[in-house]
Image (cartoon, rainbow, N blue to C red):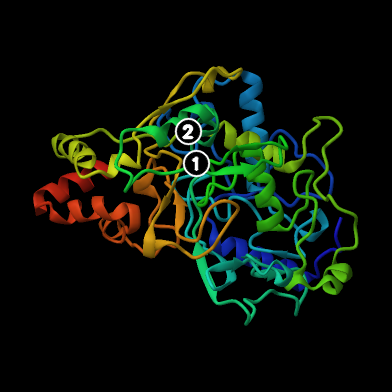
Amino acid sequence: MKTILTQSIATAALIFIAANTTIAQGPQRPAHRPPPPHRPMPPGQMPPPPPQQQPPQQAGAPLPGLTAEQLADFLAGRDEFVNVETAAGGLGPIFNNVSCVACHRQAGTGGAGTINVVRFGRTTDGAFDPLANLGGSLLQRFSIAVGTREIVPPEANVRAERQTSALFGLGLIEAIPEETIIAGVKRPLSTAVRGRVAMISDPLSGTTRVGRFGWKGQHSSVEAFCGDAYLNEMGITNALFPTENAPNGRADVLARLDTVADPEDEADPETGKADFQLAADFVKYLGAPPPRPRNADALAGQTLFATVGCADCHTPTMKTGANSVSALSEKDVPLYSDLLLHDMGALGDGIVQGPTTGREFRTPPLWGLRSSAPYLHDGRARNVDASIRLHDGQGSSARDKYAALNATQRRQMLAFLDTL
């Protein structure tokens, strides 16, 4: 694996992680050593209760109905999800954080987060250049070596922030048939709000598939989503993403710091799984965020949610198809998203990713909304009311109808959204 961090850099990394998460985390793991079924916790810290002992409606619990083998995969994946990476295990040379849970932690392990990442690029005469030769479009804020951190290059004239989304229920979203998502385009909606499908090249299957994960719908599977995060957020190359990021495109710096052949995250001979695949097991089997009970105000607000047009894009429910995993098979998925791309006008971030334009975002699911503040892609909205009022483009009609409600109706609609 990579050159071991110096003591000062290692200490800085641990301080960084401690400052950004309150979740108990396992000890650092040497390179290529598979995690034990349950890592011992540091002295003085209590481990989280086993998922089967958690209340069934608690965020961060596994899907109900998992087999014993699937629950074991969930537990092993959770161990990996909270593991603190080091350079000896593949971290860097540039990265945004040292564990998955450092960013995904609100309301429970796997939740949303308030740590933003930065994307940049250059737009000239309407054409977007991600400045890949200068390290774009994603900025990695940290480095394993002093003096090699990335910066937003002066050539960039587009800079955008993205906040961390929750991972609750992603296995259910993955299990929704592609034809169900595609059918959403053909719903009898006004062309002013009709979305479109993000057709992306899937590194897992090597085929073109419907994108359903990420702010721009840039991934179609949980495994590819996790593999991308291991490379681009922690600098750990893997079978799906084997090419290391060069700091601001500087191949000489990369050659000096990256001394071991990629991919760094290799499959364990006993399990046949790499670390990013263990993390994908955790995410795949992570339960959906539980809703709160709805009183009379919330029920009235639920009706208003549809009346003003929010449900046109934030589709209340989809259904999974037949699946070899019983816990994912033919289940209702109350995600409140059509998983389509929509032109959000001035709310767009200017970043082009694959087929998604700089004005488009995939409709973010609203389940778990109450535990994921701040809101919108960059966290600019401190509360749900502000988030609605900042909608633009294809969201402007619903925004205007919401603004026209009287104070009681707005309170009811916000009461409904607070149950999600």
Nearest the eye: 272 or 246: 246
Judging by the rendered image, the residue that carries numbered circle 1 is 197
- Between 57 and 186, the residue placed more toward the observer is 186
Residue type (three-letter) at the residue carrying disc 1: Val
Whether residue 355 is visible to the viewer of this picture, yes or no, is yes
On screen, residue 369 versus residue 325, left or right, reads left
If the image is split into quadrants, where does the N terminus sit? bottom right
Q: Which mark is residue 182?
A: 2
Across and down, in percent, residue 252 comes to 86, 73
- Dots 2, 1 in contact, CB < 8 A: yes
Left or right of 310 in this view: 367 = right
Asked which quadrant contains residue 240, the reply is top right
Q: Farthest residue toward the bottom?
A: 154
x and y, in percent, of residue 111 in the image: 49, 46
Q: Which one is in front, 71 or 148?
A: 148
**Figure label count:** 2
Q: Residues within 10 Å of mark 2 (few under 14, many from 20)?
A: some
Q: Quadrant of residue 125?
A: bottom right
Q: Which mark is residue 90?
A: none
